[in-house]
Amino acid sequence: MTNIKSQSWCWIEKGEPEKLILKDQTVRQLEEQEVLIENSYIGLNPVDWKLISSGGANWKKNHIPGVDGAGIVIKTGNKMKHIQLGTRVCYHADLNKNGSFSTHTITNGKNIIYIPEKVSDSTAAAFPCPCLTAWQSFKKVPDVVNKKVLVSGAGGSVGYFLTQLIIDAGAKVYVTSSKKHHQKFLKMGVLNAVDYNLTDWENVLLQSINHNSFDIIFDTVSGIHATGLMNMISYYGHMVAIQDRVKENTLPAFTTCISLHEIALGAFHTYASDAQIADLMIQGEKLLNDIGNSKFHLRDLNISDFEQLPRHLAELKNNNSEIKYVIKV
């Protein structure tokens, strides 16, 4: 299989998603630990437009963006011969290397998740970035059983999946989200859903817990937003900032003594050990099995054509859209 041709949406310069250019390319030769995936679907995520806007640290002209994809393995490097050709997999691509916005993607063979039979490729492509981020966030806290937990900004893909994980683990869960999601959350078992568009949403939320404090807050909005919620956390509680890190603990020293946690899924490519990566991929397959068995659910998917990728990524950015776009290759 020499001289495999691909079509890829290429980044030229910092700017808007519409500046991506579709190019024909020849797929390079694999290194010994790499595999070549023929993509069937591509998942779009906010991190994609953010990197297109700012440019990755190592990006050069004609870099291929995109973190999430699914398809079949069609070629393996010398140390990945144990992976059977034709195997259905999904993956989270290394942000510093060419990614999923292509008909073909090269990735490290250690960084793939095997897709269970009951899970479609489109669902698998929507899975890695939001759901592995939710899982890593969930695992930051040692125990959630019977704890009062707030998921701030739960309407997005990460918050939606995380809410299910912590309810399943036995927490008493409260969320903030736009009102259109409230009925779904209440059916899940959320104790109260508050519209963050209300001017006094914090007071409304605290009334629902009798003006006590939360044991744990997961914030999906921003580091600044998370910082503003720290005074709502009880003694020895936890703040898990998913969207951005909290730069400083603004609470007085030796008072509530809360723990601050940061999340960066993409960092596993550079900083995680082989054992940590293997554990994350195994957990990913288990979660996909749970999805296939209807234990957990993803947000509803909007599936569109490969040619429409830049347009939908722009919609995701400009409308702060909660729609989960998946692109059929």
Image (cartoon, rainbow, N blue to C red):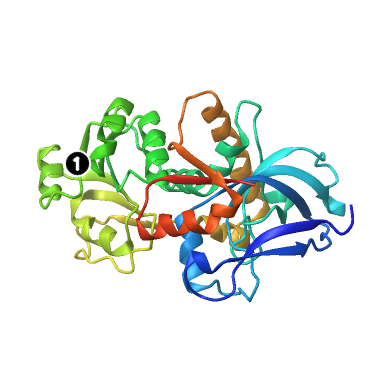
Looking at the rendered structure, the secondary structure element under dot 1 is: strand
Where is residue 71? Give x, y as percent.
69, 43
Where is residue 12? Give x, y as percent.
59, 74
Compared to 266, does 235 lie above or below?
A: above
Q: Nearer the viewer, residue 323 or 279?
A: 323
Q: Callout 1, which amino acid? A: Val
**Residue at 43%, 48% in the rendered image:** 137
Position of 178 with respect to 156 (left or right) is: left
**Residue at 59%, 45% in the rendered image:** 280
Please tell me in which quadrant of the rendered image residue 241 appears. Answer: bottom left
Q: Nearer the viewer, residue 117 or 214?
A: 117
Where is residue 59? Give x, y as percent.
61, 73
Count the numbered circles shown: 1
Where is residue 114? Give x, y as percent.
67, 38
Position of 53 with respect to 124 (left or right) is: left
Compared to 225, does 201 lie above or below?
A: above
Please tell me in which quadrant of the rendered image residue 162 appears. Answer: top left
Compared to 223, does 14 lie above or below?
A: below
Position of 2 with respect to 45 (left or right) is: right
Residue at numbered disc 1: 194
**Residue at 79%, 61% in the rendered image:** 27
**Residue at 65%, 71% in the rendered image:** 62
Q: Residue furthest right?
A: 2
Q: Nearer the viewer, residue 104 or 223?
A: 104
Any part of residue 121 in sight: yes
Please tell me in which quadrant of the rendered image residue 120 appears. Answer: top right
Compared to 209, does 14 lie above or below?
A: below
Q: Please tell me how crowded label 1 is: few (under 14), some (14-19), or many (20+) other residues with Cα within 10 Å.
A: many
Q: Nearer the viewer, residue 27 or 312?
A: 312
